[in-house]
Image: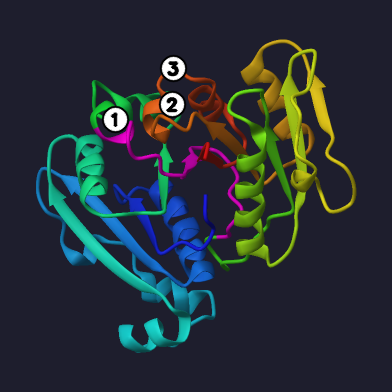
Amino acid sequence: MNASFRSILHPTDFSDLSGAAFAHALRIALAARCKLRLLHIAEHNAEASAFPNVQRLLVQWGLSEEGDPPSAVSTRLGLDVDNISLEGKNPAQGIVGFLSEHTSDLVVIATHGRDGIDHWLEGSVSEAVFRGAAIPTLFMTHGARGFVSQVSGDIRLKRVLVPVDFAPAPGPAIEAVRRFARLMTGGDVIMHLVHVGNTAPPVPASSSNAAGPPSVMLRSGDVVKSIVDAAIEYDVDFIGMPTAGHQGVLDALRGSTTERVIRHAPCPVLAVPAA
């Protein structure tokens, strides 16, 4: 994952949960100075006024003034926002179809736990497109604590948990998570590596925390519970989950460890395709 994003996609259903995901998508787009596409798919096209009010939130965050035109925001903040409304009965199919025609470097999406994930991934929605389009995806789950304040826009990002295994190799995902954290904070964060099993996979020296050589915590028992428990224990601000590189992120999530972690995580989950 290249943290120099050019385009971020945020699918929205205008719910409160989508509002939390929108705040994260906007803050990431501001950090990357890139295009942000807000996509709504429903049986009837949405009015422009229904979309999240970017200008209002930028003013609230102290980053813009009332009445600033979009051109001024674009010049000063490097941010371009597109509101896109498409007709369709199946949001997941609409998202997949949109991504097949418009390149995105990151998807930021809200989920409602089990029901939400099942809804987005039902049927063969992801199989046709995402198998050949591995896109990093930040999942905001209902009840999880985010790392961007909707009120102030402040970023709380100090600790990250990265579950590692022998396949996919952990190095690329660790570095991708590190680059993302640097983009958001301007520096390194504390990274906790965890493996559920008896023997830790090898981690490249370049993937270590700046303070010393790489260290992988070993846990035993149920994989998902162990990962979620570690996230709670270390009070991490997001979980970086490596996913199989030959599959797209959403395709790889079907019935996977990543999907089950997303359902129960106390914080956002960044699914990172292997290189």
Side of 170 where 82 appears, left or right: left
Of labels 1 and 2, earlier in sequence is 1
- Identify which amino acid the numbered label 1 is placed on: Ser
> What's drawn in magenta, residue-wise?
129-149
Q: Residue at x 70, y 38 (%)?
A: 161
Q: Residue at x 33, y 31 (%)?
A: 131
Residue with the mark numbered 2: 253
Looking at the image, can residue 69 be seen?
no
Estimate the spatial distance between the alpha carbons at disc 1 and disc 3, rounded to whole Å: 13 Å
Numbered badge on residue 255: 3
Question: Counting other residues with Cα less than 10 Å from the Cα at mark 3, is it few (<14), some (14-19), or many (20 or more)?
Answer: few
Q: Is residue 174 visible?
A: yes
**Residues at discs 2 and 3 in contact (Cβ within 8 Å):** yes
Q: Position of residue 30 (x, y in %)?
A: 49, 70
Mark sitting earlier along the chain (1/3): 1
Seen in the picture, residue 157 relative to 220 is either above or below; the reply is below
Residue 258 included in the magenta stretch of the image: no
The three-letter amino acid code for the residue at tag 2 is Leu
Alpha carbon distance from label 2 to label 3? 6 Å
Identity of the residue furthest to the right in this view: 212
Count up the numbered dots.
Answer: 3
Above or below for 187 versus 14 = below
The answer to whether residue 92 is above or below residue 11 is: above
Q: Quadrant of residue 3?
A: bottom right
- Mark 1: few/some/many CA within 10 Å (<14, 14-19, 20+): many
Q: CA distance from mark 1 to mark 2?
A: 10 Å
Q: Which residue is mark 1?
A: 126
Name the one closer to the observer, 69 or 19.
Answer: 69
Query: Are the residues at dot 1 and dot 2 in contact (C-beta closer than 8 Å)?
Result: yes
Residue 105 x %, y %: 41, 54
